[in-house]
Image: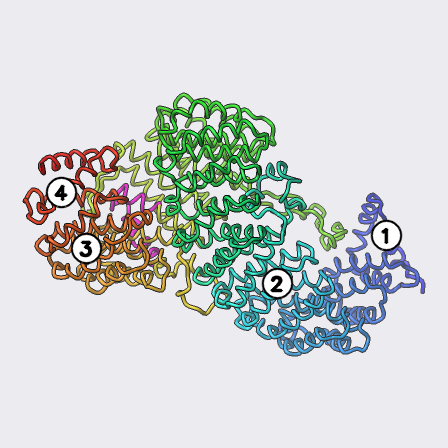
Amino acid sequence: MALSADAAQMATYLAALTHPDTNAIRQAEIALKPILKNSQCVPAMIEVVKSRETQNDAVRHVTVIVLRKRIIGHLAKFDAATKAALRAELLSILQTESSRPVRNGVVALVATVCKVEADGSADSSQAAAGWPELFQFIAAAAGDTHPEARELAFLLLGEMTETIGIHLKPQFVTLVSLFSAGLSDGDIKVQNASVKALGLLLSYLSDEDDIDTFAPLIPPILTVAEACRARNDEEIVSTTLDVLYDLCFSPSQAVAAHMTTIVKFSQICMADSNLEMGVRDSAALVVATMAESRPKHLGRDVPLLTGLLETIFNLIENSDGSAAGALFESNPAWKEDFEGTEGYDESEDGATTETGMAQGTLDMLACEVPKKFIFEPVVSRCMSRLGSTDPKQRKAGIACLGVIAEGCAEPLRENLAQVMPHVFKAAGDNDARVRECACFALGQISEHCQPEVLSYSSQILPIVFALLDDANIAVQATSCYVLEMFCERLEPDGVRPLLDPLVKKLASMLEATNKRSVQEMTVAALAATAVAAEEEFAPYVPGVANLMAKLMQLKDEKTFSLRGRALECMGHIAIAVGKDTFRPYFQSTMQCACEGLTFESTDLHEFAYAAFANLSKVMGDEFSPVLQELVPHLITVISQDEGQLEKAEEAQGNQFNALDDSDEEDEEGGYVMHIRTALLESKKGAITAIGEMAAHSGAAFVPFLGDAMTVLLKAADNWHPLIKVECADAMASLIVPCVAQDHGGEIKWEKGDIAGASPLSANTTQAVNVIMKALVVLMQDDTKEVVGKACESIQSIIELCGPHSFASVANECLENTYALLAKEAPCQQLEDYGEEFGDEDDDHDAFMTSVCDLVGSFGRVMGHHFVQYLPKFLPPICEYAKSSRPPSDRSMAVGCLGELAQELGAGISEYWSNVFYPAAIAGLADSDYSVRRNAAFCIGVSCEGLGESVASQYGTMLQAMSPLFGIDVNDGDTAAACVDNASAAVARMITTSPSSVPLAQVLPVVLKALPLKNDMTENETVYNCLFRLLEKNQPDLIANKLELSRVFAEAASEASNVDDDLKEKLKLALQSLH
């Protein structure tokens, strides 16, 4: 049948759209644009679509695409009869169309018409009644004997997802039966189409209550997907995994009931080497997301969790890739240096490797699943594999130990004595891959298990030093990483024995190697060594600075990271050796940093800002001359918008955008917002630099205070937590210049004194009020890290400026703090996705330590005014002290009680017997050293503050404290601190009520534990107590004269960490004993 004139003209233009000639397509689009504005184009295009005899499939397919783009605008202009005729034509085409591309296009067109009609209905529940023939067509097709018809039914349902989700809720039960039949259909194409359609609907409804209706279909979906996996039909497997990912976040208990089968299917896909790596990684994402959304469910399902872990361990065992490679994935130099070497996992740029997938999943499990469930099964598998004769198993064992170091840091710290011997043994393994992974594990443990790991310095440093000479270059580089992580918090005593050979070795490595990744790691290790050695690094500064000077002149873009590392090293050296020693290198370092800002490299900019922050901290007022140049630049960087509009790339299926249903020829469409993450990092560095300059440049920073405050207040409202955290941190520093200029660097304030005149100047008051208001707002942020940093800054300000700085925001700040303690704050209200378990499985939230520290600061600043808030604050604090809570929570809570007891004195008397006393006594019997030391401190300061009123309980308290004196002080710093705090507690009790302490029994025990080994802040308390007893010639003390002499002599020795004034008193007291 011949086309009408209108249809023939359109067919000519539409045919041009199928040509490969871009110019011909553009001309056709120009010609079609005015024609498509006329509603008569719709019947003309329908005519073209139906002309199977005269028009080829490509032209008809293009016609359907264009019609779908224009139908929305024209449909509203049609009367009811025209609409009905159009709907009938479309269903007729579907019944007879044999070309799959054309039919699929008509399916999409039908779905669009249905959606427009339904959305335009005044009664949503009756919207579907507007086209009953369509739903009759679908029902009939679904029951047809021909598989093509049944497939068509589900293709239509898939395209109509949104319409179904909004307007077809009354038919959901019927749809369940329809989908159930499709999933069990004997034809594979029908099964696949039903999975796709149902998957789209499940994803759409995943966070709605209606998902419960379809949740029973999850097992049959997985059955179909598993059959597809077995025959390598990756499309359906991938589609199913995408749906499962969406379901992970559903709060539905009906969905949660299928967690085990969802995770098991994903686990099978992860392990299937026949699947593409991208599909396997999608499966790993489902597992990781399930761990994030339902960590307690996953942790409590022991068979499921152990099965997952076995799969992960097996993947790492059987993969040839480096299990330590995760350290360097973000460093392009690593790939360039090690590509082609043994153990290098060759993959496309940015593609996930099998090892990377397994390690990433394990890392997520370790971070999200409660430690009481995840730690033991992982570590037990690590230990058993480390004892294997197979190097692949040993590699997996030591690698996995490193992977969980971050997420399981708390239990790992508690078990270092059992774990570290295995790590040391692996570091000497005869297999290079095991040694490399041992270095990786050592580095991760060094990074995340501070400070406990520092007690192993005498073993770790020699091992790492030997590994720097390893024949395997990757082992050498990873050893440098260990040094960097380990030395960052090491004291000079720890690094001193190996300092000279270590510096010389690293320097020679730097000069000998031509591998940039090794050079970068070596420079970072030198920087960390300097920080650990402090002033003792001074003799090495000239030589190391000379090496860094060469690197800081690098101009090749590929070497910018190395140049930045060298600049970073100089900044760390400055912090280590101080102003006087570093002064000769200040100008050249600053010059390099400023020159870096002239390059188009955000990496160099970040390194420069970090250098400015460190150098301002070290040089103090000598840094002031460069403020005029640097501060405006930093403010400009912070003010920049990290988002930018960019022309969107045309996605497949969005062709012929010029023919979209729009009359605006100059419409600025086709743009999307792109976030420049590199600029985010630069802004973060610039904010840090501004904060450090304000904190250390004194009054010289005052002229820049207004602009700095304005830009930080604006940045504090940034969408990205990274920026808000830095702002919260830097804000407190903006008060320091005011204090330097108006108060001589110190504000003298009295605890709890708000009745008298404020000691704050007008400028300081104004700055404090603005900053405090902003920080109180940040306390209500939905990101825990931001909230924690805001609490720290508020504490810093009120302790610097006193109670008057708190007055304007006190009520709101106290309310926010209580909400945090009670777990009612916005950052604690994240959806639990159906986790019905209480908080007994919860892990320690690190930011809560900052919250509890702020509570202690309230007592320190508000004094007796805070006593009225104790009835409200104490119950939630004590919740954290329960035995079911993690050790860090218990330690935090008891420590907070101790601070309040110290600051409020007799103000806690009403709460002594039912809160402070039972919590402290229970804490003394705790299994964790940190809890016990804080409990001892709480006992001591409580006795000091409450005086004779609690003296009758001394016997019970001393008895509860006595086991602490039996702790081996060589068991780590926390063990030593525990004994120190017990000694100080007894000293406070003796000072407060000597007659209530059986000195004859107590003094020998205390003296044996002295001098203090770790907590030097208690020296005054302990020795002043002994001085007073000595002045009175207390008989029980004199009876222990020899032991007392030993204590005084050791405490007064040159090697002692006691401060000089107290040493002089000790020497005088020692003389009086002879």
Taking depth in this image into account, of 979 and 969 the one nearest to the observer is: 969
**Front label number (4 vs 1):** 4
**Front label number (3 vs 4):** 4
Mark positioned earlier in the residue sequence (2 or 4) = 2
Dot 3 amino acid type: Ser
User: Label 2 to label 4, Cα distance in Å?
Assistant: 70 Å
User: Label 2 to label 3, Cα distance in Å?
Assistant: 55 Å
**Front label number (2 vs 3):** 2
Measured as percent of width and height from the top left, residue 99 is found at 85, 64
Q: How is the image coloured?
A: rainbow
Residue labelled with disc 4: 1042
Does residue 676 appear in this view?
no
Does residue 946 appear in this view?
yes
User: Label 4 to label 1, Cα distance in Å?
Assistant: 109 Å
Dot 4 amino acid type: Leu
Residue labelled with disc 3: 942
Mark seen at residue 13: 1
Q: Is residue 550 above or below residue 885?
A: above
Mark 2 neighbour density, 10 Å: few (under 14) some (14–19) many (20 or more):
many
Mark positioned earlier in the residue sequence (3 or 1) = 1
Dot 1 amino acid type: Tyr
Q: Give the residue at the far right of this rendering.
A: 1
Q: Which range is magenta?
A: 793-818
Q: Quadrant of residue 168?
A: bottom right
